[in-house]
Amino acid sequence: MMSNNGSPRQSASLSIQATRSTKSDNASYEQEDSEVASERTVQKKRPQFYSQYFKRYELMIEFTNLRNPSHCPSGIYIMPSLDNMNVWYGSIFVHKGYYRNGIFKFKIAIPQEYPDKAPSVDFINDVFHPLVDVYRRFSLKQRFPQWTPHKDFISHILHYIKSSFKKSVLDNLQQHNCPNQEAWLMYRNKPEVFAEFAKNCAEYSVMDSNLYGDHQGSSSIRFNKLSDQKFEELKTMILNRSVHPGGGSENETEEQSFTPGRSNETPTRVV
């Protein structure tokens, strides 16, 4: 027997309305959850964008700081690529040791993850050296067994590149850190033969085809031959400066003609 509180039709109607209400509430909650999730996704993306922006800014500051002589070792020119801030081109002038009188060009590739990930260094010309493999990649393993962000910097790499041509560093290279085993064994067992190889390497580096050749299309450092007229102009400028120290700057812009690039910027250098 049916109770007087309501008919079966009324009960069914109330049940349908309750179901619809529940579905509506669920849909509303799902929409809110979706909006919250979307907002969180945007928030997650924002730090990544800002992170890349600040990393690039920090990289520009790091390059600017290389103008400080204590940051950029003497005998090195360094400048970013003409079209990529994450690629730097450099040249090192070696004045002493096995590789004296050599001029070696190199490229530093800086990953997007820098400073969390270490840059890589590749020589542009062939270099017979225990730390340089057959692909001209310069090994950082001994000096930086584990790259530490905000403690290790590109300036430290530049100092290591310079010191790697010195006898004190060559003497202490560990075999397992040297990709060129032939060069390492030769240095250890036949130093006089190694010295001859290094001398030939230095002479090869200053040949016209290597020094003035366009090996890297986007390289920001180029070497041009100095004409007799330009040499006389520079000599006169230097003599005038020595006679009148702190004098006028009429010919100061000629200084960068030793290693001109294709941009208006002057390479960071201390020679």
Image: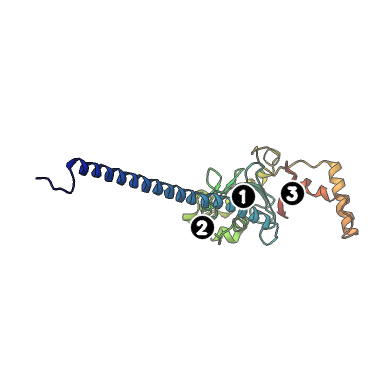
Mark drawn on residue 147: 2
Mark drawn on residue 266: 3
Q: If the image is split into quadrants, where does the C terminus sit?
A: bottom right
Quarter of the image holding residue 161?
A: bottom right
In space, the residues marked 1 and 2 are separated at their CA atoms by 29 Å
Whether the residues at callouts 1 and 2 have beta carbons within 8 Å, the answer is: no
Secondary structure at numbered mark 2: loop
- Nearer the camera: disc 3 or disc 1: 3
In space, the residues marked 3 and 2 are separated at their CA atoms by 30 Å
Tell me which label, 3 or 2, sits earlier in the chain. Answer: 2
**Three-letter amino acid code at the position of disc 2:** Trp
**Three-letter amino acid code at the position of disc 3:** Thr
**Three-letter amino acid code at the position of disc 1:** Ala
Q: Position of residue 265 (x, y in %)?
A: 74, 47
Secondary structure at numbered mark 1: helix
Tell me which label, 3 or 1, sits earlier in the chain. Answer: 1
47 vs 92, left or right, is left
Label 3 packing within 10 angstroms: few (<14), some (14-19), many (20+): some
According to the picture, the residue beneath numbered tag 1 turns out to be 198
Q: Position of residue 182 (x, y in %)?
A: 51, 49
Q: If the image is split into quadrants, where does the N terminus sit?
A: top left
Mark drawn on residue 251: none
